[in-house]
Amino acid sequence: MNKKNKCGCQCGCETGSEKTSDTKKILIIAWRRLVAEGNTCPRCGSTEAELGKAADQLKEKLKSLDIDVVLEKTELSIDEFKKAPVKSNSILFNGISLENIINAKTGHSQCCDVCGDEECRTVEIKGETFETIPAEIIVRAGLKIAADM
C-alpha cells in the first residue's frame, strides 16, 4: 500500500509539496476534462475559464509566500470518460480533490451531446449544486492547501 504524504499525494515528497529551490514550493492544480473530437462539454469549457482566473489569482496571492502555482490540464478521451464520467471536470490540489478540501460533495447530472448518455460531474456545496466550478471556490481550496504547505 502506498503511503500518503502531508500533501495527500503519493509523490514521494517529504514536505507535502515539491520544491523548486530551498524556499520555493509548488501548488499543483491538476484538472481533467473530456475532449471528444476536439470538443468538450459546456460545463468543462466554462470551468476552464474559471480555472484560468483562479490560477492567476492564486499565483498573485501566493507569490509573497514563495509558492509557485502550476496548472496541469489533462484530456480524457471519450472511452476514458465513459468508464468513469465523474473523473471529468475534476480538480486536484497537490493530489487532494477540491471536494475533500472544502467539504463538498461530488454529484452528477445530464449535460450535453458531447457527453452522450453519461452524466457529468457536479459539485455540491451546502446544498447548492455547481455544474461550472466558480473561480472563488477554486481559489478558496487553493488557499487552504497553501496554508498547510
Image (cartoon, rainbow, N blue to C red):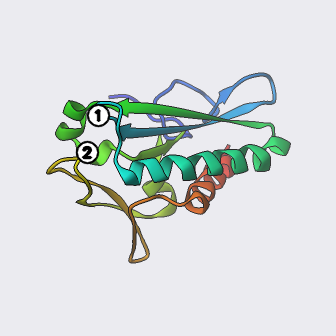
Mark 1 is surrounded, within 10 Å at the Cα level, by few (under 14), some (14 to 19) or many (20 or more) other residues, namely some
- The residue most toward the right is 64
Residue drawn where x is 44% and y is 55% of the image:
100
**Residue of label 2:** 114
Q: Position of residue 54 (x, y in %)?
A: 63, 51
Q: Vertically, is 25 above or below 64?
A: above
Quarter the N terminus occupies: top left
Amino acid type at circle 2 is Val
Number of marks: 2
Circle 1: element type: loop
Q: Position of residue 115 (x, y in %)?
A: 23, 46
* Label annotation for residue 7: none
Residue drawn where x is 78% and y is 22% of the image:
21
Residue drawn where x is 48% and y is 43% of the image:
92
Q: Position of residue 3 (x, y in %)?
A: 42, 32
Asked whether, in this view, residue 133 is left or right of residue 75, the answer is right
Asked whether, in this view, residue 76 is left or right of residue 142, the answer is left
Q: Vertically, is 63 above or below 26?
A: below
- The residue most toward the bottom is 127
Mark 2 is surrounded, within 10 Å at the Cα level, by few (under 14), some (14 to 19) or many (20 or more) other residues, namely some
Amino acid type at circle 1 is Ala
Q: Earlier in the sequence, mark 2 or mark 1?
A: 1
Circle 2: element type: loop
Front-lying residue, 70 or 65: 70
- Whether residues under marks 2 and 1 lie with C-beta atoms below 8 angstroms apart, the answer is yes
Front-lying residue, 52 or 23: 52
**Residue of label 1:** 36
